[in-house]
Each structure stands twice: as structure tokens, then as C-alpha cells.
């Protein structure tokens, strides 16, 4: 599995493990590649590393899973206009990597309760302890509505890797990401 570790800095003496997969679409379809986040100074540098995976990509997504607890999705369209979604604002408070990725991101316009009322994933008990942040519509034009994304991250027992797998399944990039995990 492709993964890295991130020093906690002021957040403690331990490191945070993470998996970072870039999933990009160009005229030939979806491809996936790992991204090493070691040494990045800010979210703009993370975006630059995502952009470098395929500068000609129509859509570039970065899935960052941390410690089986947090998921951040970054998106660039044609290398521009960075959009960010985080599964839980606590990630920014608990780690330096989280602070770097979502520390300056605002809460989403749609709450988890609204996602449940929208009828998606009925019968799924939401995890009331999470507080998603950022652009919940980040994947809407790719087949994952804001309500669906919020339902996935709020589903009790759903790991970040499960959410990534489901999103990539909808995109048609699940095999590429699975190959990265197995490498």
C-alpha cells in the first residue's frame, strides 16, 4: 500500500500515517498515481503536486486518507480553481497535515441532517460526531451529489478508504486506485 507519514510537530510526538492517491481524467480516461506529501508547506503546494501528475488533465482529484479516520478530497479542473472537501474539521485540530489541508476551509452549505432528509442512504445511521467542511458539491458533476458524499462520510463504521473506493467505483477508477493500495 502506498502511504506516508507526517510528523505531528506541535500536535505531539507521534506521526500521522496517510494514503494520498491522485485520480486524474484526460482524453484517455482515468488514471491513478501516488503523491508524496512530505515537505509540503501549504495546500497550494499540494495542489501543485496534484497538477504535476498530469498537467493536461481535465479533472484532477486527490484523496488523502489519514489514520483510518479522516478523508480530504482536493479537486482541480484543467489545473485551476482548487476545491477542497474534508470529512471532519477535527482533522485540522488534531494534526499538522489536517491543518495544512483543511485548516482554512469553511463548513459546507449542506448539513449531514439535510443529506439524510434528502432520501439518500435511507436507513444509514449518521455519525453525529463528525463535522464535514468545504465544498460538498465537489463531485456532483461526476455522479456523487453533495447529499451522497455527506451520507458516505457520515455513515457509522465507514472508513475513509471505503468512501474513496465508493467514489472511485462511481467514477470508474476503482481498479486504478486498488492497484495503488496493493503496490
Image (cartoon, helix red, strand yellow):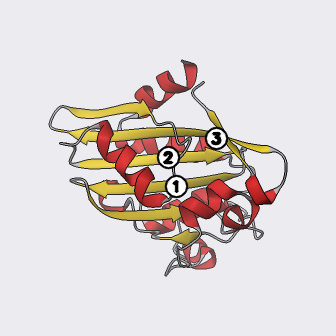
| Residue highlighted by disc 1 | 41
Q: Nearer the viewer, residue 60 or 109?
A: 60
Position of 67 relative to 81 (above/below)? above
Provide the secondary structure element on which disc 1 rests: loop
Q: Does 83 sit left or right of 93 as displayed? A: left
| Residue highlighted by disc 3 | 18
Give the foreground label among 2 and 1. 1
Task: Please give the name of the residue rendered at 66% of the width and 53% of the height, measured from the top-left corner.
Answer: 70
Q: Could you tell me residue 154's position as x and y percent?
A: 66, 62
Q: Nearer the viewer, residue 9 or 65?
A: 9
Residue 27 visible in image: yes
Name the disc covering residue 107, or none.
none
Q: Could you tell me residue 17's position as x and y percent?
A: 70, 39
Position of 111 relative to 165 (above/below)? below
Q: How far is the residue under mark 2 from the one under mark 3?
A: 10 Å
Q: Does 136 sit left or right of 97 as displayed? A: left
Name the disc covering residue 63, or none.
2
Q: How far is the residue under mark 2 from the one under mark 1?
A: 18 Å
In the picture, residue 104 is in which quadrant?
Answer: bottom right
Q: Does 141 sit left or right of 157 as displayed? A: left
Amino acid at each position: 500500500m502506498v502511504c506516508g507519514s507526517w510528523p505531528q510537530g506541535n500536535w505531539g510526538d507521534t506521526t500521522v500515517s496517510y494514503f494520498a492517491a491522485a485520480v486524474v481524467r484526460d482524453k484517455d480516461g482515468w488514471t491513478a498515481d501516488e503523491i508524496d506529501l512530505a515537505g509540503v508547506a501549504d495546500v497550494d503546494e499540494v495542489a501543485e503536486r496534484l497538477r504535476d501528475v498530469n498537467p493536461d488533465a481535465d479533472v484532477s482529484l486527490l484523496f488523502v486518507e489519514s489514520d483510518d479516520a479522516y478523508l480530504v478530497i482536493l479537486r482541480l479542473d484543467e489545473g485551476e480553481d482548487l476545491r477542497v472537501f474534508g470529512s471532519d474539521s477535527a482533522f485540522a485540530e488534531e494534526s499538522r497535515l489536517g491543518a495544512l489541508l483543511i485548516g482554512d476551509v469553511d463548513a459546507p452549505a449542506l448539513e449531514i441532517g439535510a443529506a439524510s432528509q434528502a432520501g439518500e442512504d435511507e436507513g444509514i445511521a449518521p455519525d453525529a460526531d463528525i463535522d464535514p467542511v468545504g465544498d460538498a458539491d465537489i463531485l456532483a458533476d461526476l455522479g456523487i451529489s453533495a447529499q451522497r458524499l455527506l451520507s458516505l462520510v457520515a455513515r457509522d463504521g465507514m472508513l475513509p478508504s471505503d468512501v474513496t473506493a465508493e467514489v472511485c467505483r462511481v467514477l470508474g477508477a476503482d481498479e486504478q486506485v486498488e492497484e495503488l493500495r496493493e503496490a
